[in-house]
Amino acid sequence: MKKTWVLLVVIIIGLSLCVYGIARILSRNVRPAAHTANLPERIVSLAPNLTEILFALGLDEKIAAVSNGSNFPAEAAEKEKIGTFWQPNTEVIIAAKPDLVITLWFEQQKSVANSLDRLGYQVLTLKIEKIEELLGAIKDIGGITGCKQRAEKLSENIRSQLEDLRLKASNTKKVKVLWVIQAEPLRVAGRDSFVNELIELAGGENAIGDTIQPYPPISSEELLACKAEVIIQSAMGTSDLAGQQQAAEIFWNKWQSLPAVKNKKVYVIESDTVLRLGPRLPQGVKTIARYLHPEIFK
């Protein structure tokens, strides 16, 4: 009788592991490549950060098409385009004859992914909203494209660089940072966002307390109460950063009681490097750290 129960427990555990594995695959909406012969030769990327990951893994020759915003490395801009990040064109994707389409986990792209999946295309859908999810996504892409070891090395290299930056900033005084996503109406990065992770890695502290939304709107009263020591504003596009910096200084001048304004620590930074959850993330954190702790990160 005892042996029967042991056997039953082993069977249940085995079935549970099988169900878990199947669920994990389905959650990514992907049919994994079983053999080297089935590895994708034509890959379509629906987001700039996904494109950067593919290039970083040495898969540039297999990239058939990318989203419009894919501008790094320079070779990405020469690839055929399949529509914007927010509105991928399903017909153009199909015309690219992909063996694999890589998408992100948000409504507009999920809709395209589901359509392609129903048509029989291999689709990998990834949720990349935090740093750990990025590191996991790199490994997932490496697994399905046949460069698992390169992906693991890239993921660990990013992790190592971020940890080095965190340790370097750990002995500094935490600087209160207000990260502005949009100036009018005022919208900022809250604590439940990957921007908050960047701020903390760079030796800062989010000036905004806990919020319901990751990127909440805030009132003038909340703005004045936050006592931000540094204001970082995301640039709109990559052109005329000097002009955007000047405009930001004029805009913030009305709040002279804020330490960041009073001490002229309002900065407009180029968004692609800093806010793109991709292989250049350590470079982005270092950029932030230079504004928060210029005495250390020269």
Image (tube, rainbow, N blue to C red):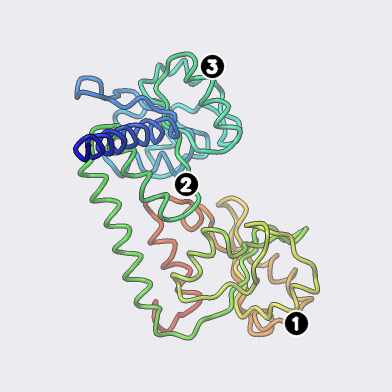
Between disc 1 and disc 2, the foreground one is 2
Q: CA distance from mark 1 to mark 3?
A: 52 Å
Q: Give above or below for 115 relative to 211.
A: above
Quadrant location, the N terminus: top left
Q: Secondary structure at mark 2?
A: loop
Residue type at mark 2: give it: Ile
Question: In the image, residue 176 lies at what x, y percent?
Answer: 58, 78
Q: Residue at x 44, y 70 (%)?
A: 201
- Nearer the N terminus, badge 1 or badge 3? 3
Q: Which residue is mark 2?
A: 128
Would residue 124 appear left or right of 291 to someone viewing this image? left
Mark 3: which amino acid? Glu
- Residue at 24% x, 24% y is 34
| Residue 128 vertical position relative to residue 44 in the rendered view, above or below | below
Mark 3–mark 2 distance (CA, rounded to whole Å): 25 Å
Q: Would you name the residue on which mark 1 appears?
A: 256
**Residue 282 image position (x, y, % from top left):** 38, 61
Label 1 Cα neighbours within 10 Å, binned few <14 / some 14-19 / many ≥20? few
* Dots 3, 2 in contact, CB < 8 A: no
Q: Earlier in the sequence, mark 3 or mark 2?
A: 3
Q: Position of residue 109 (x, y in %)?
A: 55, 32
Q: Are marks 1 and 2 in contact (CB under 8 Å)?
A: no
Q: Which residue does the numbered mark 3 point to in the structure image?
A: 91
Disc 1 to disc 2, how far (Cα)?
37 Å
Which residue is at a point 20% across and 44% down the rendered structure image?
A: 149
- Amino acid tagged 1: Gln
- The crowding category of the residue bearing disc 3, from other C-alpha atoms within 10 Å (few below 14, some 14 to 19, many at least 20), is few
User: Circle 3 — which element?
Assistant: helix
Who is closer to the viewer here, 181 or 163? 163
Toward the viewer: 274 or 148?
Answer: 148
Q: Nearer the viewer, mark 3 or mark 2?
A: 2
